[in-house]
Amino acid sequence: MKLNFMSCRRASELAAKQCITALSRGERIWLGMHLLACAACRKIGLQISAIEQTLRLLQEPDATHEATGGPQLSDESRRRIQSVLADRT
């Protein structure tokens, strides 16, 4: 019996698709089987998940951003940067 495995291209497409919508049962099974056998696609899946999570965080409203018109450094971060820059001069 010959098994036809999903291509890496198709696995990447499904990994990206599942960020947007739910995969069908068959798609989940085929993707899962492919990911068991393919370390490269597992890594790509992790990267896609990290990108999705970052984009989701960027879309969340933040009271600090709204009040100042954009992201701002905390006072502690500002002091650390100034200290590093002072040490370099």
Image (cartoon, grey):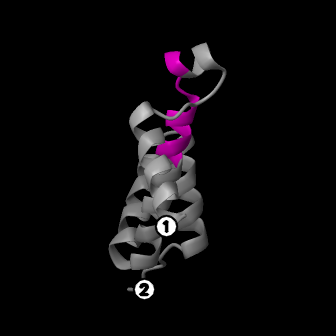
Name the residue rendered at 63%, 27% in the picture. 70
Pointer 1: what residue?
A: 44
Label 2 environment density (alpha carbons within 10 Å; few <14, some 14–19, many ≥20): few
With respect to residue 37, does 75 lie above or below?
above
Looking at this rendering, what residue extends furthest in the bottom direction? 1
Q: In the rendering, at what x and y percent does residue 85 appear?
A: 52, 56
Residue 83 visible within the image:
yes
Q: In the rendering, at what x and y percent does residue 47 appear?
A: 48, 61
* Magenta-colored segment: predominant secondary structure: helix
Residue 62 visible within the image:
no
Foreground: disc 2 or disc 1: 1
Pointer 2: what residue?
A: 2
Looking at this rendering, what residue extends furthest in the left direction? 36
Q: Nearer the viewer, residue 42 or 25?
A: 42
Amino acid at the residue labelled 2 = Lys
Q: In the rendering, at what x and y percent does residue 18 appear?
A: 50, 47
Q: Nearer the viewer, residue 51 or 7?
A: 51
The residues colored magenta run: 52-64
With respect to residue 16, does 12 lie above or below?
below
Amino acid at the residue labelled 1 = Ile
Q: Nearer the viewer, residue 40 or 70?
A: 70
Element assignment for label 2: loop
Name the residue rendered at 52%, 35% in the picture. 56
